[in-house]
């Protein structure tokens, strides 16, 4: 995709995105992103409010056709589909791990994890570490077709290591680029590449 | 120590006669040995020692002589269980676990069901009279072996696919072969445990915590027991006290003729322990006795996983039980009264968050009785939230910005809605379960959330004021009465409060007790950020307002030498002061602060 489209893609994945967010997700330089968001606004593709950008309906449509042009062939590429399918399977494990992070079973009832049991928390973070090892391989395969996806490897590992070092907000806090936030954006990115809808369970 | 044929240079059988060092046999092996020493029934096991790991790390291969010792040890396991490994009519299956003296992340997970192959699968099917289970055991072994030992993403077994064809596909996905014989699989699994000692996470953890790299891990090999062999077999979980209420009676569930996975899968409804008492009375008595023994030796409530095989009880795992905040308070006070623990222990077992949770606002008694339920679903994040229903995250953000209390109601939520969730008092969705985005994010934000209310169930609520009970999954029309429990209402909580007041290095007053010269931070916006507190409270005798009552605020108050702070409720701040003040050592999580 061209840089302008990539910036729009960054806005779409983040929804309310700052220039910093867009840089983080696209890997583009801050100077060019600052110019490109202005261009997107001028062309009526995005709106700005309080330093945050949001795609307009026109922007959404333009982006959708940019996806088809950039990724149309991938959607029927056997190798890519296989890697994507493997991601969805690892995704189920991650969702379960995050649920276990947030809730615990007490005699058959589900209650919120109050994080008073450091061993329990450490075991879940360890499981996320296992999942991370598995998704790393999947991302390598996906990255052979869409190299920018490889960025997620570092972002995931960085969140994981902060959690491993004891700052547990980095597991699933929705207000920072926690492991779950980055994972969710990766999933969103893949769904857009594949032109699929998220399935809720 | 008497020498035995199965005790060699590299491995040790655990027979309950002595308690080898944790450094040599690892934490998991040690806890098995510890249970055996207390005369508790545990499936037989042996340990490959950390010395074998050290040898492996040096040379890159399993040490000389380990093969012979492994064979003898497996032979011993066969004799102990009356079963045979990898062959015969009663096949012996084993589990393999990693276990260093200090547990750490990145170590290999447990591989179960080693010993199953085409031949033993058939024997096993005949023995338990269940072809499906034998086949599942074969599948589970290969899944775990592939995922954990070979680190592959396992292809799904096709509905009509032959097991051997699937096995070949795992080997293709892994780019490695699975050893033909169960003995070869055992060796490869042991080697994988040793390898995991040098994984990224394990190395990083040791560096971070100053643990020597040459300590090494042990490997525990344990016979598996089966709860699905007949009506006198079964599986279950026992808590030595009720983990929800703290009531001092054993609490648990049991499922006849079932294996652990059946309980977890939710396909079967486990029965009350009474059913176990009538099915296998001897095993039941042994279990209750074991629970008592474990509770008194560990001086805390135990969560015990067990299996009954042919009427005989086996304990699979015992650990300190997780408990609800209310149970934590009851158990701590009860155990002090029973003379099991001291006051200091009792106080230290309760953290400020648990008290906050007990004292958090909830629907008043009877408040919901006459209220109309306008939607109900799965309560996935606790708390009560009241506000006007809006169905769009952007609108939620705008209206909340203008000072209105809003409840975000959507079909499902996605990252597009997080900005609306951040400002909402509660969230409700039509679709989704306990792992849906709304549930995951709602819990992360501490936002009362009810999900899966059903399609079309909430769009009609737009503009109405509702009360969302995120614990019970109910949405009520109107704003219901909410009560905030008081820390002196409950007898045990009041007892804890009394103790905490005596032991806290910092006095905590209720607002009506506040001395005249209290520094008031209420009007100071900067005081909401605990990081600013040290500068603000410098030189004061006591303070109130801002973040002073938070855990970090209390720490700042102690560091600045304050005599007192003012808070409501007082118990969380007192506990925070005791937890931080008592010992000055910082936990790993604080090192980066």
Image: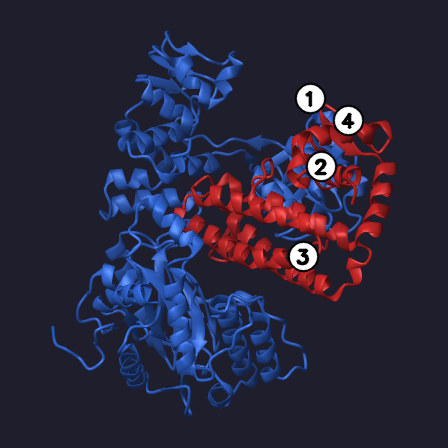
Residue beneath disc 2: B408
Split into 4 quadrants, where in the image is the N terminus of chain A? top right
Residue beneath disc 3: A144
The chain whose colour is blue is: B
Residue beneath disc 4: A48
Instruction: Using a 10 Å C-alpha cutoff, classify the residue at mark 2 as few (fewer than 14 neighbours), some (14 to 19) or many (20 or more).
Output: many
Residue beneath disc 1: B403
- Cα separation, mark 2 vs mark 3, equals 40 Å
| Residue in the image at 35% along x and 57% along y | B319
The chain whose colour is red is: A
Asked whether the residues under the numbered discs 2 and 4 touch, taking CB atoms below 8 Å apart as contact, a structural biologist would say: no
* Between marks 3 and 4 in the image, the one whose residue lies nearer the viewer: 3
Chain ID of residue with mark 3? A
Name the element at disc 3.
loop
- Cα separation, mark 1 vs mark 4, equals 23 Å
First-in-chain label (3 vs 4):
4
| In the image: residue B402, left or right of residue B354 | right
Asked whether the residues under the numbered discs 1 and 4 touch, taking CB atoms below 8 Å apart as contact, a structural biologist would say: no
Name the element at disc 1.
loop
């Amino acid at each position: 995709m061209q840089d302008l489209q990539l910036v729009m893609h960054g806005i779409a994945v983040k929804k309310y995105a700052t220039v910093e967010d867009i840089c983080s997700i696209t890997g583009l330089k801050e100077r060019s992103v600052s110019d490109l968001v202005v261009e997107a606004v001028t062309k009526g593709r995005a709106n700005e409010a309080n330093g945050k950008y949001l795609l307009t309906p026109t922007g959404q449509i333009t982006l959708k056709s940019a996806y088809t042009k950039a990724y149309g062939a991938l959607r029927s590429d056997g190798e890519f589909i296989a890697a994507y399918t493997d991601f969805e399977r690892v995704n189920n494990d991650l969702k379960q791990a995050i649920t276990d992070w947030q809730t615990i079973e007490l005699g058959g009832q589900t209650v919120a994890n109050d994080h008073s049991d450091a061993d329990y928390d450490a075991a879940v973070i360890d499981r996320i570490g296992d999942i991370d090892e598995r998704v790393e391989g999947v991302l390598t395969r996906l990255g052979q077709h869409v190299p920018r996806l490889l960025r997620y490897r570092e972002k995931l590992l960085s969140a994981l290591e902060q959690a491993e070092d004891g700052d547990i907000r980095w597991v699933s806090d929705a207000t920072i680029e926690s492991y779950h936030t980055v994972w969710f954006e990766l999933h969103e990115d893949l769904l857009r590449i594949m032109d699929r809808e998220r399935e809720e369970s | 120590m008497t020498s035995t044929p199965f005790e060699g240079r590299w491995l040790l059988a655990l027979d309950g006669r002595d308690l080898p060092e944790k450094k040599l046999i690892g934490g998991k092996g040690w806890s098995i040995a510890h249970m055996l020493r207390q005369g508790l029934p545990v499936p037989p096991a042996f340990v490959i020692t950390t010395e074998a790991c050290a040898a492996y790390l040096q040379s890159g291969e399993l040490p000389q002589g380990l093969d012979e010792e492994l064979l003898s040890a497996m032979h011993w396991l066969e004799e102990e269980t009356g079963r045979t490994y990898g062959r015969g009519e009663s096949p012996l299956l084993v589990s393999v676990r990693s276990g260093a003296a200090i547990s750490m992340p990145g170590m290999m997970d447990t591989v179960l069901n080693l010993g199953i192959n085409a031949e033993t699968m058939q024997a096993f099917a005949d023995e338990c009279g269940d072809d499906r289970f034998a086949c599942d055991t074969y599948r589970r072994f290969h899944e775990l072996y592939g995922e954990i030992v070979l680190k592959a993403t396992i292809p799904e077994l096709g509905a009509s696919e032959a097991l051997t064809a699937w096995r070949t596909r795992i080997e293709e996905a892994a780019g490695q072969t699975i050893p033909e014989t169960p003995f070869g699989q055992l060796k490869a699994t042991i080697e994988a445990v040793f390898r995991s000692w040098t994984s990224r996470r394990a190395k990083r953890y040791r560096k971070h915590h100053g643990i020597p790299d040459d300590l090494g891990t042990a490997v525990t090999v344990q016979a598996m027991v089966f709860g699905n062999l007949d009506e006198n077999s079964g599986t279950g979980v026992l808590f030595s006290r009720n983990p929800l209420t703290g009531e001092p009676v054993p609490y648990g569930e049991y499922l006849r003729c079932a294996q652990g996975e059946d309980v977890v899968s939710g396909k079967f409804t486990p029965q009350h322990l009474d059913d176990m008492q009538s099915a296998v009375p001897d095993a039941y008595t042994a279990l209750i006795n074991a629970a008592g023994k474990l509770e008194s030796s560990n001086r805390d409530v135990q969560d015990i996983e067990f299996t009954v095989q042919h009427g005989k009880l086996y304990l699979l795992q015992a650990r300190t039980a997780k408990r609800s905040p209310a149970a934590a308070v009851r158990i701590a006070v009860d155990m002090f009264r029973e003379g099991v623990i001291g006051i200091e222990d009792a106080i230290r077992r309760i953290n400020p968050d648990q008290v906050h949770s007990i004292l958090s606002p909830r629907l008043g008694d009877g408040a919901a009785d006459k209220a109309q339920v306008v939607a109900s679903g799965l309560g996935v994040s606790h708390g009560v939230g009241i506000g006007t229903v809006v169905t769009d995250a952007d609108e939620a953000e705008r209206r909340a910005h203008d000072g209105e209390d809003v409840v975000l109601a959507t079909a499902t939520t996605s990252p597009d809605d997080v900005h609306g969730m951040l400002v909402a008092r509660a969230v409700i969705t039509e679709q989704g379960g306990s792992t849906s985005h709304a549930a995951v994010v709602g819990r992360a934000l501490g936002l009362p959330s009810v999900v899966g209310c059903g399609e079309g169930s909430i769009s009609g609520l737009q503009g109405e004021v509702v009360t969302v009970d995120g614990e019970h999954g109910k949405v009520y029309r109107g704003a219901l009465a909410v009560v905030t429990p008081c820390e002196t209402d409950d007898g045990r909580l009041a007892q804890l409060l009394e103790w905490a007041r005596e032991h806290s290095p910092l006095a905590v007053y209720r607002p009506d007790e506040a001395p005249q010269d209290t520094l008031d931070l209420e009007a100071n916006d900067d005081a909401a950020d605990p990081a600013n507190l040290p500068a603000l409270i410098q030189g004061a005798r006591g303070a109130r307002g801002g973040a002073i009552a938070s855990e970090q605020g209390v720490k700042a108050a102690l560091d600045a030498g304050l005599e007192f702070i003012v808070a409501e409720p007082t118990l969380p701040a007192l506990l925070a002061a005791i937890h931080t003040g008592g010992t000055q050592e910082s936990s790993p999580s604080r090192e980066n602060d």
